[in-house]
Amino acid sequence: MTTRKIELEKIALRTLKAERIAVFPHTGADGDCLGAGSALREALTSVGVYATVVVDAPVVSRYKFLPFSDEAVVYNEDDPQGFMRSVVGSDTADLAILVDCSIPERIGNCSVLLDVCDERAVIDHHFSETCSVKFCCIDDQASSTGELIFDFIESLEVLTGKKIFSRSIAVNILAAIYFDTGGLRYSNTTSKAFDICGRLFREFSPDLREIVYNIFEKTSKSKICIQSKAFSLIEYYENSRIAVCKLTGPMISECGADDDDMDGICTSIKNVEGVEVAFVLRERNENEVRGNIRSSELFDASKLASSFGGGGHRRAAGFTVTNMSIEEIGRIIVTMSIEKIRSGQDGSK
Ligand SMILES: [Mn+2]
């Protein structure tokens, strides 16, 4: 058995001993963590373990088509025990499972709820040096957390001798894998991801059009508005190998754009021929700027993001900076990127 299988089986055994489980997707919940979290919750429920998905903000409309995503509960109060009582029927949960993230900071306001969970587990595919949690499956070779949840459910089926996979679990896992691999197109796509999608597709014939439309194609006036502003404002440097786009608070509010509307802008800019690294900076409020980075093999996006206290994957990463103007951050990233290109140290080493 691979380490991944062993870790997942340990977590599966632990969940079978639990009565109440809280599942935590990361803040700014996306298609992978919501699909994975909802599939996990359904699987646990079907073997008689009470589980609930807890998020720090309402699920955005794009993901409402995911089965049971409407049952995710939002934690937005100051009473962890009272909240637990209302969602799991007890002041504490036996187990907290973090999905698609591994550290408390990534679950936003919900991190205070970890204090009212007896134990913690992690199922994630973001690289991490260490994992101090007892039940931990971090596999950065996995395409998505959805892929890991598929293996987890397989373990659960073996351990319980029950058939657990269902059409709704299939939709959630397919959506999770599709989201993180861009529909089995990105370089993080694994043969395992193809296998899983093939198997789920064969067994449950989920509506692929619905998944693709909701995740990739559906757009809105606010999205088109902010995209057109973004594309008209791209600044190019170093023979157009670097591209930067700065979206100020007034531009964003003029379009009425939310985070989801701005998703994908950075990828589109990175796709401009010749661009090796793309940055989208956007003002969140008076003193907070969010940065997205997409890069070619030449740049290590996660390394660039970490110099601003952020992180992510090699070719896609992000960061949040406070108390610095968007202009200032823009100047710093451009200087850093130019230096890396000119010194030949492209950030990949
Ligand atoms: Mn993911």
Image (cartoon, helix red, strand yellow):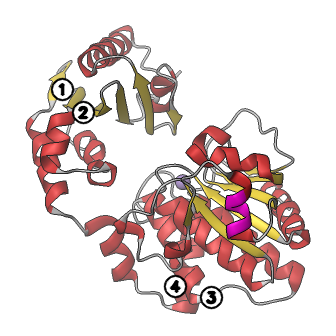
- Which comes before the other along the chain, label 4 or label 2? 4
Q: Residue at x 58, y 91 (%)?
A: 203
Name the residue that disc number 3 marks. Answer: 166
* 322 relative position to 139: left or right: left
Q: Is residue 317 left or right of residue 152?
A: left
**Image mark for residue 7:** none
Q: Position of residue 110 (x, y in %)?
A: 62, 49
The residue closer to the viewer here, 344 or 226, is: 226
Q: Which residue is mark 2?
A: 275
Image coordinates for residue 48, horizontal then vertical, percent: 81, 83
Sort mark 1 into few (<14), some (14-19) or many (20+) by Cα contacts within 10 Å.
Answer: some
> Does dot 3 land on a helix, a strand or a loop?
loop
* Residue 192 appears in view: no
Of the two numbered discs 3 and 4 in the rendering, the one whose residue sits closer to the viewer: 3
**Residue at mark 1 to residue at mark 4: CA–CA distance:** 42 Å
**Element type at mark 1:** loop
Residue 77 in the image: x percent, y percent?
A: 57, 52
| Tags 2 and 1 touching, CB below 8 Å | yes
User: Which of the labelled discs sits on residue 201, or is there none?
Assistant: 4
Q: Which residues are magenta?
A: 82-86
Q: Callout 2, which amino acid?
A: Val
Q: Examine the structure image and report whether residue 79 is included in the region drawn in magenta.
A: no
